[in-house]
Amino acid sequence: MKYILMHRELPVAILSINDISGTVYRVDDMLQPAHLPTGLYAADRKELAKNLNLWLAGRTIPASRSGFHRALEDLQVQKKLQLSANVLMMKCFALSLSDQYWLNPVEQPLEWRKVNFYNNDFSEDVGNILFGQIPQQDTLDLVSPCNTSDGWLKKKGKILNGQRVLVKGGSGMAQQESFNEVVASLLCRKLGISYVEYSLLFEGDKPYSVCPNMTTDRQDFVSAYYIFSAYPRADGVSAYEHFLSCCEKLGVPDVTKQLQQMMILDYLICDQNRHFGNFGAIRDAVTLEWVGFAPIFDSGTSLWFDQYASKIKALADAPAKPFAATQQAQLAFARDGLQTLDLSALNGCKDEVLAIFEQAHFGEPDRANILADALAARCEFLQKKCLFQNDNSLSRCF
C-alpha cells in the first residue's frame, strides 16, 4: 500500500509499505528532501528505503519492553487479537508525541489537524494493555501514542487535566527508577539545568513517574543518535568531538554548555544508561530551525537502582554512557561545564532527597537513608574536589 511520509501537513516522500510488517520496500518519489528526518539523507532511493526502515523500527515498542510479550499473549487469548509492535505502529499511522512525522495512506488520506495526538484526544486502551490491564469492552481503540514509544520500562501516554503526560514504571521489587526521576528533577532545579519536571503518581501500591510532554505541536525531538549519524566520523575523532561537530554543522545552538551539564548531572547520580536515544535536540518542524539542546529527561536508570543497599559505595567509579566507559572518564569532558554550575546549591538537599525516597517501599532496611547519604557524599565530593580547582584540571579530583 502507498503512504505519504508527512511532516505535519507537508508531504515529504511517497512510499510503498507493507501494512503488516511496516516495511518500506520502495521509495516511489521524493517531494521535500529537506524535511526528511535528520540523519536519513541518502545517495539513492534504495539506500533511503533502508534508512527509513531503521527509522520506523525505532518508532515501534521494543521487544525488551517489560511485560510487552505477556500483554500480546493476553490480548490473543482474551480478545483473539494477534498484534505485533509493527502492527501497532501502523494502526496509529506512525504518529508520535515526540515529533511531527507520520504516514498518510494515499487511498484514504487523512488531515493532520484531525489525527495528531497533540490536539486530539486519544484512547488509553493500548496504555492500559501495556500495563497489564486488558480492557473489558469488546471493541478496542488501538490508535495511541503508546504505539510509537521506545524504552524498556512500562510506559503509557495519558491526558491529565488537558495536558499530555508520560506515565512510566520502574523495575524489580524496588521500582526505584520512578523515584530517581524525581530526584534528578530536584538536582536540575537547584543547579539551574534545563530539564523535564517529573513527579510521582501512585496507582494502588505501585509508584510511577509522570512528566509533561517535551515537544509542542510544531517541534521535533531529534535524538543524539540521528544527530551523531548526520555526518561521517573521521578516524581518530572521539565520539564526544564528533557529536559536537555534527551539532555545529547542523546549526544546533548552545550545545556544549548544556551537554556538559548533563554529564555532570549523570556523574552525580551515577546514571548508567544515558544512551544516544535519551538526549538530543529540538527542531522547529515548520522552519527547520534548531531550537536548541533538549531538556534533561529519562534519568531513572541511576542512583544504584540495581544494587543492594549494602553494596553501594558512594564514591566508587561507575559505568557511564555515551562518551566514555566510566563516570570519571566522562566527567573529564565536562571540565569547563563545572564552572557554569553553582554546586553549593546542592548543600542541604539530603533531607529533600530522603523525603522522596521515603515514599518508596524498597523492601530493604534503611535503603532510603543509604541512597540519600550516598548522593550527598557524591555532591560534596565533586564540589570540594572539582569546583574550586584553579589548575583547570580534573586529574587531581580522583
Image (cartoon, grey):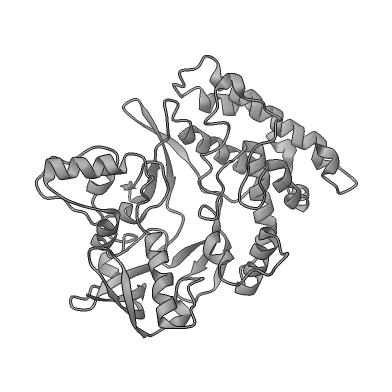
Residue 48: % across, % down: 43, 76
Residue at figure coordinates x 31%, y 61% from the top left: 119
Residue 53: % across, % down: 38, 67
User: Seen in the image, is 73 located left or right of residue 346?
Assistant: left
**Looking at the picture, does residue 39 appear above or below residue 340?**
below
Residue 212: % across, % down: 43, 49
Q: Quadrant of the N terminus?
A: bottom left
Residue farthest toward the top in the current orientation of the protein: 365
User: Seen in the image, is 353 located left or right of residue 361?
Assistant: right
Residue farthest toward the right in the current orientation of the protein: 391
Residue 94: % across, % down: 32, 63
User: Seen in the image, is 345 located left or right of residue 303?
Assistant: right
Residue at figure coordinates x 29%, y 54% from the top left: 85
Residue 74 occupies which quadrant of the picture? Answer: top left
**Looking at the picture, does residue 329 appear above or below residue 355?**
below
Residue at figure coordinates x 55%, y 53% from the top left: 295
Residue at figure coordinates x 46%, y 35% from the top left: 178
- Given residues 47 and 307, the one toward you in this image is 47
Q: Quadrant of the C terminus?
A: top right
Residue 215 occupies which quadrant of the picture? Answer: bottom left
